[in-house]
């Protein structure tokens, strides 16, 4: 098996783009990377990265969200409604934090220190 290395790329395949802007992921890459029925597209600099979509259980931070909402006195249908609203905000917030950290790492944005975020104890 021969593997070409181009800027740390261990495998490369040129694919066609249809008139409907569609591409086919080569079977080798599809299997190797663990794709299923969804993909995530991310722009990184001047590149489009297509990777398997992260499957989440939907339960991220569920216990913390419920604890907070119950402490606010919510119950029944109102608790469920607010839980759904709050939980839907988690993924976009985490994605924004990741994008911000990537910009800092690339030198495109300034970073905040611990003291900037939480202040200092005096």
Image: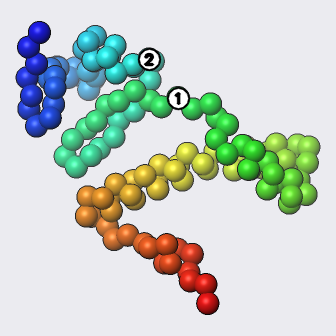
| Quadrant of the rendering where the C terminus is positioned | bottom right
Q: Residue at x 60, y 48 (%)?
A: 90
Q: Secondary structure at mark 1?
A: loop
| Quadrant of the rendering where the N terminus is positioned | top left
- Residue 110, above or below 92: below
Q: Position of residue 40 (x, y in %)?
A: 39, 33
Residue 20 or residue 5, whichever sits in front: 5
Q: Residues within 10 Å of mark 1 (few under 14, many from 20)?
A: few
Residue beneath disc 1 = 55
Return the disc, 1 or 2, that comes first in the chain's sequence. Answer: 2
Q: Secondary structure at mark 2?
A: loop
Q: Residues within 10 Å of mark 2 (few under 14, many from 20)?
A: few
Q: Is residue 9 left or right of residue 55?
A: left
Query: Cβ–Cβ below 8 Å for labels 1 and 2?
Result: yes
Q: Residue at x 8, y 14 (%)?
A: 2
Q: Position of residue 4 (x, y in %)?
A: 8, 23
Q: Position of residue 27 (x, y in %)?
A: 28, 10
What label does residue 32 carry, if any?
Answer: none
Q: Is residue 14 visible?
A: no
Residue beneath disc 2 = 36
C-alpha separation, residue under disc 1 versus residue under disc 2 = 10 Å
Q: Is residue 36 left or right of residue 6?
A: right
- Residue 67, above or below 9: below
Residue 45 or residue 10, whichever sits in front: 10
Q: Residue at x 56, y 81 (%)?
A: 119
- Residue 95, above or below 52: below
Q: Position of residue 21 (x, y in %)?
A: 26, 26
Count of all numbered marks drawn on residues in the image: 2
For the rendered model, the colour scheme is: rainbow
Q: Residue at x 81, y 51 (%)?
A: 67
Q: Is residue 103 visible?
A: yes
Q: Is residue 59 left or right of residue 38?
A: right
């Amino acid at each position: 098996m021969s593997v070409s290395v181009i800027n740390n790329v261990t495998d490369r395949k040129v694919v066609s783009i249809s008139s409907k802007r569609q591409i086919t992921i080569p079977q080798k890459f599809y299997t190797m990377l663990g794709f299923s029925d969804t993909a995530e597209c991310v722009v990184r600099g001047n590149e489009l990265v297509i990777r398997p979509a992260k499957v989440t259980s939907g339960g991220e931070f569920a216990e913390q969200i419920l604890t907070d909402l119950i402490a606010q006195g919510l119950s029944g249908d109102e608790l469920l409604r607010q839980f759904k609203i709050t939980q839907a905000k988690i993924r976009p917030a985490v994605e924004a934090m990741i994008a911000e950290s990537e910009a800092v790492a690339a030198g495109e944005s300034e970073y905040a220190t611990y003291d900037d975020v939480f202040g200092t104890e005096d």
